[in-house]
Amino acid sequence: MQETCFAMLLEVTERALAHTGKKEAIIVGGVAANKRFKNMLDIMCKERGAEAFAVPIEYSMDNGTMIAWTGMLQFKSGWKDSKKMKIDPNWRGDETDITWMQSL
C-alpha cells in the first residue's frame, strides 16, 4: 500500500514539474523522514533532470519547526521582501519563484 501511495504522490509531483518547468522538488513533513519516498523522489527527479530536496530529518516532524527552518534559510540568504505581505486565497505555490534559494 505504501508503494502505491508513494507512486501516486510522485506521479502528481512529476506532472507538476512538467507543467511548471521547475527543476527542483522539495518534500517536508513526515514524508520527508521516509527513506523509501526520498529515494523514489530522487530517482524520479534524476530521470527528469531535476533536483530533489528534503528538509533535514530532525526538522521533518513538526510544522512549526519546518516553517522556522525555511525562515532561517531565507534569512541566511540575505533575501528581503520590500513589499508588504498580501494574502491571496488563489495563490499557487507552483507559480512562485523562490529566488532566495539560489543564494544558499
Image (spheres, rainbow, N blue to C red):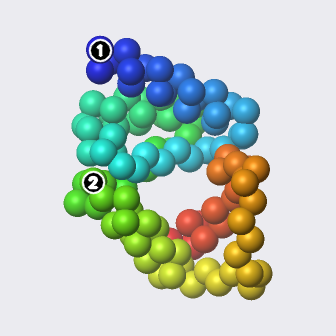
Q: Is residue 92 visible?
A: yes
- Reading the image, the residue beneath label 1 is 1
Q: Count the marks.
A: 2
Residue 67 spot, x, y in % from top left? 43, 66
Which residue is at 64% across, 62% downward?
98
Q: Position of residue 3 (x, y in %)?
A: 32, 18
- Circle 2 residues within 10 Å: few <14, some 14–19, many ≥20: some
Q: Compared to 100, does 27 lie above or below?
A: above
Q: What residue sits 50% from the left and 35% below the top?
A: 45
Give 86 or 43, whichever is nearer the viewer. Answer: 86
Q: Looking at the image, is 63 positioned above or below residue 94?
A: below
At which x and y percent is residue 74?
A: 52, 75
Q: In this orientation, does residue 73 appear?
A: no
Q: Is residue 61 left or right of residue 15?
A: left
Q: Residue at x 37, y 29 (%)?
A: 40
Q: Which kind of residue does numbered mark 1 sit on?
A: Met
Can you say whether 13 is above or below 60 in the image? above
Three-letter amino acid code of the residue under disc 2: Met
Q: Earlier in the sequence, mark 2 or mark 1?
A: 1
The residue shown at (48%, 81%) is 76
Q: Which residue is mark 2?
A: 61
* Mark 1 surroundings within 10 Å by alpha-carbon count, few (fewer than 14), some (14 through 19), many (20 or more): few
Q: Quadrant of the N terminus?
A: top left
Q: Quadrant of residue 39?
A: top left
Compute the Cα span from label 2 to label 1.
22 Å
Q: Determine whether the residue tagged by mark 1 lies in a helix, strand or loop.
A: loop
Q: Tell me the SS state at disc 2.
A: loop
